[in-house]
Amino acid sequence: MKGLIAVVAIAVAALLAYNYVHTGKLALIPSSLSRDEQALQRIEERFNAARRQFEAAGRAAGVSGADTTADADAARRDIDQAENDLAALRTHLGGALQAKADQLRSEIEAFRDEMR
């Protein structure tokens, strides 16, 4: 009986963690996201992936002295694309999504300043 309760507790915790990672909200059953929310989430994921790629290129260049300019340029292009997509999406967002888009734009600008 204790084993069954432990398995159920682990499953619930895993489901909560999965939903939190994918939606940013702590819920047992995920709420469906609107198209705009999904688009904003994809842009944020693209930016985060590009940021990680740029930082990894910097670390690789610092550690091994390897030429990682191609990786850094690819990350810059991805950040440019994310910024352009965000600008296009922001034209028809409202309310909380507009605030989230503004926050993401601020993060992109701050990272661009770090890249220089």
Image (tube, rainbow, N blue to C red):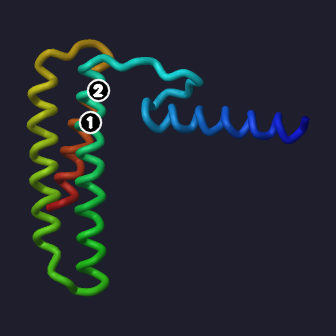
The answer to whether 47 appears left or right of 11 in the picture is left
Find residue 80 and report its horizontal and vertical position in percent. 10, 47
Instruction: Provide the secondary structure element on which disc 2 rests.
Output: helix
Q: Residue at x 36, y 20 (%)?
A: 33
Q: Residues within 10 Å of mark 1 (few under 14, many from 20)?
A: some
Residue type, mark 1 in image:
Arg
Residue type, mark 2 in image:
Gln
Q: Residue at x 29, y 26 (%)?
A: 38
Q: Residues within 10 Å of mark 2 (few under 14, many from 20)?
A: few
Q: Is residue 98 visible?
A: no
Find residue 42 and report its horizontal and vertical position in percent. 26, 36
The residue at which mark 1 appears reads as: 42
Query: Which quarter of the picture shows residue 12?
Result: top right
The residue at which mark 2 appears reads as: 38
Q: Residue at x 10, y 63 (%)?
A: 73
Work out which quarter of the rendered image holds the N terminus and state it. top right
Find residue 5 and report its horizontal and vertical position in percent. 82, 34
**Gap between marks 1 and 2, in whole Å?**
6 Å
Question: Contact (CB < 8 A) between labels 1 and 2?
Answer: yes
| Label ID, residue 81 | none
Q: Residue at x 11, y 19 (%)?
A: 91
Find residue 83 and report its horizontal and vertical position in percent. 13, 39
Query: Which quarter of the picture shows residue 71?
Result: bottom left
For this rendering, which residue is in front, 45 or 51?
45
Query: Which quarter of the picture shows residue 68?
Result: bottom left
The answer to whether 73 appears left or right of 59 in the picture is left
